[in-house]
Image (spheres, helix red, strand yellow):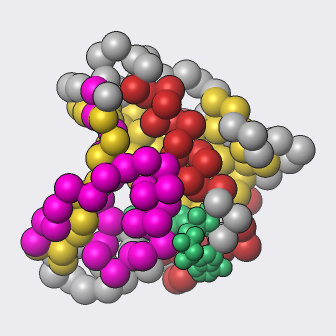
Amino acid sequence: MLPNELATRRLLLRAPQPADARKIFDAYTQSAEAARYMVWRPHAAVAQTEAFIAECIALFGEGARWPYILALHDAPDAPIGMLEARASGYTVDIGYVLAQAYWGRGLMPEAVDALAGAALAVPAFFRLQATCDVNNRNSARVLEKAGFTREGRLERFVVHPNISPEPGPSYMYARCR
Ligand SMILES: CC(C)(COP(=O)(O)OP(=O)(O)OC[C@H]1O[C@@H](n2cnc3c(N)ncnc32)[C@H](O)[C@@H]1OP(=O)(O)O)[C@@H](O)C(=O)NCCC(=O)NCCS
């Protein structure tokens, strides 16, 4: 129900391909900084990223999951991050990560805003939502800039293994139509 590709002013959101694995391993999956507030630990070997990308390729557009690769228009084969959408009923959950070299340029808000616009134009979808660790200020800013509203704080909600083995608090953000 979501498109296979989306274009924003600076970014292409596209389906993953096998060659992305090595490139995102080099760009961010092995980075402790990028992984800090994610639900995964930094990858120790490229084989882990290859297995992850193989799963993304199998999932893309099937079973209501769209793990988009983000790339700049002039380098579509050079992935710089990912933005995943997961539909469940009338709600679409999103998650995202960008290589640290590209932080601070407003790229993720641009991608999230475009995805939200496309998803909320689908008659079946009414709500896009995302959660982030209460200390992940950068992620909260992405959502605020993309027109999401903070709805509340969810205690003991998600395990972020790079922070603690116990589930910690998250903020819930949503953008609805
Ligand atoms: C969260 C993330 C996607 C932000 O993407 P982005 O394209 O850099 O977003 P923005 O450029 O709008 O910057 C967002 C905030 O990050 C901070 N920031 C900007 N540049 C930064 C840099 N070089 N280093 C650290 N933080 C920076 C700023 O506080 C900024 O907020 P502001 O615009 O109010 O000043 C990116 O930081 C990231 O991939 N982080 C790791 C993965 C992650 O946490 N994902 C979300 C899980 S819920």
Q: Residue 169 at x, y = what percent?
A: 18, 74
Quarter that holds the N terminus: top left
In the image, residue 115 above or below residue 51: above
Q: Could you say which quadrant of the image residue 33 lies in?
A: bottom right
**For residue 123, side relative to residue 60 (left or right):** left
Q: Is residue 52 above or below residue 154?
A: above
Residue 6 x, y percent position in the rendering: 64, 30
The relative height of residue 87 versus residue 122 in the rendered view (above or below) is below
Pick the front one: 159 or 54: 159
Horizontal and vertical percent position of residue 13:
64, 38
Q: Position of residue 51 (x, y in %)?
A: 51, 53
Magenta stretch: residue 128 in it?
Answer: yes
Magenta run includes residue 24: no
Task: Report whether 147 appears left or right of 130.
Answer: right
Work out which residue is located at the far bottom of the displayed protein and give it.
Answer: 164
**32 or 118, which is in the foreground?**
118
Is the residue 65 above or below the residue 160 in the image?
above
Identify the residue at image location x=13%, y=65%. Answer: 154
Q: Can residue 49 be seen in this view?
A: no
Is residue 167 rendered to the left or right of residue 140?
left
Q: In which quarter of the image is ligand 1?
A: bottom right
Residue furthest to the left: 155
Q: The C terminus is located in which quarter?
A: top left
Residue 151 in sight: yes
How many numbered marks does the figure carry?
A: 0
**Nearer the observer, 42 or 150:** 150
Tell me the residue at 72%/52% (across/down). Answer: 79
The residue lying furthest to the top in this view is: 123
Residue lying at 24% horizontally and 65% vertically, measured from the top left: 171
Question: Dividing the picture into quarters, in which one does residue 57 lie?
Answer: top right
Answer with the quarter of the image where residue 127 lies: top left
Chain part drawn in magenta: 126-155
